[in-house]
Amino acid sequence: MSQQTTSPTKGGALARQAAMLCQDRAFQLYLDRRKRAKFGMTESTLPDGTHNQDDARDWLCAACQIQSRAELDHNPTAAATFRRIRQRFMKWKQRPGRQQ
């Protein structure tokens, strides 16, 4: 009885990129600031450093409408959403005057 035939979908390059992104402190900070801007919150309500690696993973899965980052390599719609998220983050990261 091989476990491989019933194992969940394996992740590839996109799943690895997503995992690294969720571990990135700058991405976690981006999520803090994005949520504050989106919901009109103050820094005292949602301070920098609120999002952690697990929060980032949960947010990314919800945004891409997937259960696991491994699905990114097998779901073209989710992959496209992930690429847009990563592009927006990279653009935010490169903005002049952005504070860490």
Image (cartoon, rainbow, N blue to C red):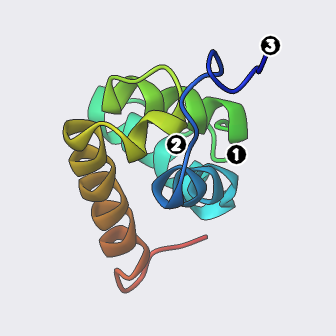
Q: Amino acid at mark 2?
A: Asp
Q: Position of residue 71 (x, y in %)?
A: 44, 34
| Mark 1–mark 3 CB contact (< 8 Å) | no
Task: Name the foreground residue: 78 vs 97.
Answer: 78
Q: Earlier in the sequence, mark 2 or mark 3?
A: 3
Q: Which residue is mark 1?
A: 49
Q: Position of residue 16 (x, y in %)?
A: 60, 56
Q: Position of residue 36 (x, y in %)?
A: 41, 36
Task: Name the foreground residue: 70 vs 4.
Answer: 4
Q: In the shown orientation, is residue 76 left or right of residue 6?
A: left
In which quadrant will I find the N terminus? Answer: top right
Q: Amino acid at mark 1?
A: Gly
In which quadrant will I find the C terminus? Answer: bottom right
Check disc 1: other Cα within 10 Å, few if <14, some if 14-19, many if 20+: some
Q: Earlier in the sequence, mark 1 or mark 2?
A: 2
| Mark 1–mark 2 CB contact (< 8 Å) | yes
Q: Amino acid at mark 3?
A: Met
Q: In the shown orientation, is residue 81 left or right of residue 73?
A: left
Picture disc at residue 1? 3
Mark 1 and mark 2: Cα distance apart in space: 7 Å
In the figure, 89 relative to 31: above or below?
Answer: below
Q: Tell me which residue sits at (34%, 30%) in the image.
A: 63
Circle nearer the viewer, 1 or 3: 3
Tell me the quarter of the picture where residue 47 sits.
top right
Picture disc at residue 32? 2
